[in-house]
Image (spheres, grey):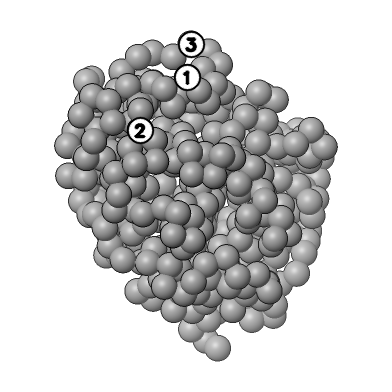
Amino acid sequence: MAIDINGFCDDRFAAVKDVMRNNLETGADVGASFAATIDGEMVVDIWGGHLDEAKVQPWQEDSIVNVWSTTKTMSFLCALILADRGELDFDAPVAKYWPEFSQNGKDGVLVWHIMNHAAGLSGLDKPLAPGDIYNWEKMTKLLAQQAPWWEPGSATGYHALTQGYLIGEVVRRITGKSIGQFFREEVAQPLDADFSIGVPDADLLRIGDMLAVDNAGALGGDEEVGSIAQRTFLSPAPKAKDSLTREWRQAEIPAANGHGNARSVAKIHSVLACGGSACGVELLSSATAKSIMKPRISGTDMVLGMPLTFGLGFGLNSEAVPLSPNANTCFWAGWGGSIAIIDQDAKLSMSFAMNNMFPTLLGDPRAFGFIGAMYEALAET
């Protein structure tokens, strides 16, 4: 029986629907959404499949899922907005905004270091008790007290969960608002985008369960004992099944627990794709929007074990990560497969969000299928 693909798709991008249909028919996906904007206009907004493993609840137009680390891109945008307003300097010490952070030799940690996984704080020295990741004050206090694991700014080591607390606390110190509140008021509401860092009660029933494959039950475990990678995933140590709990869904974990769909992610990042303004909303100046594409640090990431180049928060298109034919393209992805792509040369924003988790942090072939289909169609027009 043919699987229905719902939503809107411009005829130019019909091949994108074929990618989704194939993923659902083969079982690569259980439920999924893909969306793309060009010059701020939604050209693809499709979804299909189911929200649950039993395939009883169909994926609806307003269904949302945990996009894991694609959430990080929303924290980047919050920081960019503050920088654009002159309230945050990426080249200033973090301690300028968060004085307690200067403990244990962190006076020289700059804001761009925490944006780009270069602060030396990819994990915690102290093991955490269950539920500690939901305690903002405890997490930020521990990070402020800890010494860096390597010289800040010298290399990157993916701050899988800690990055969100670091950026979020800087946002809170500047604005007096949690990053979830700031994001909601300054980004999601103006753009009418269905994305939350901390899901309200009214939206809990719209969430699809993340379905973890056997080896995506927890991060880490395969790394060399004592390595930066192994220590990173020892503490904090999130598990995929955490995402099924109300506590996870309603906390503010801005590196990992954002909930939305491909439509909302693509719509939000259409602002960056279009130079700071889209959908009738101006969030940033053109100069600030373009600044995300300037390389800040490159090298083999000590946690992910792959060569990466970072701009401001976002990973940049490169020979090692060739996601686009266009130079001014950046991205970030979430555990299990979600992704956000921002291409300023084509004024293109794309996103994929799903509930069937692929067992990697980066590098999902399903996402590559959508991206490739979009660029092939654009090359023909």
Say if mark 1 contacts mark 2, CB within 8 Å: no
Q: Residues within 10 Å of mark 3 (few under 14, many from 20)?
A: few
Q: Residues within 10 Å of mark 2 (few under 14, many from 20)?
A: few
Q: Residues within 10 Å of mark 1 (few under 14, many from 20)?
A: few
Identified by mark 2, the residue type is Pro
Residue 314's mark?
none
Give SS at disc 3: loop
Q: Nearer the viewer, mark 1 or mark 3?
A: 1
Residue at image position (67%, 30%) is 250
Q: x, y (%) of residue 223? A: 28, 27
In this picture, is 90 found above or below 67?
below
Q: Nearer the viewer, residue 48 or 344?
A: 344
Q: Nearer the viewer, mark 2 or mark 3?
A: 2
Q: CA distance from mark 1 to mark 2?
A: 16 Å
Residue at image position (63%, 56%) is 187
Residue 129's mark?
3
Q: Earlier in the sequence, mark 1 or mark 2?
A: 2
Q: x, y (%) of residue 309? A: 28, 57
In the rendered image, the quadrant that contains the C terminus is: bottom right
Say if mark 1 contacts mark 3, CB within 8 Å: no
Identified by mark 3, the residue type is Ala
Q: Which residue is mark 1?
A: 138
In this picture, is 30 found above or below 79?
above
Residue 99's mark?
2
Q: x, y (%) of residue 33? A: 67, 55
Residue at image position (80%, 45%) is 58
Q: Earlier in the sequence, mark 1 or mark 3?
A: 3
In this picture, is 212 found above or below 81?
above
Q: x, y (%) of residue 380? A: 52, 86
| Residue 160 visible within the image | no
Identified by mark 1, the residue type is Lys
Residue at image position (46%, 74%) is 286
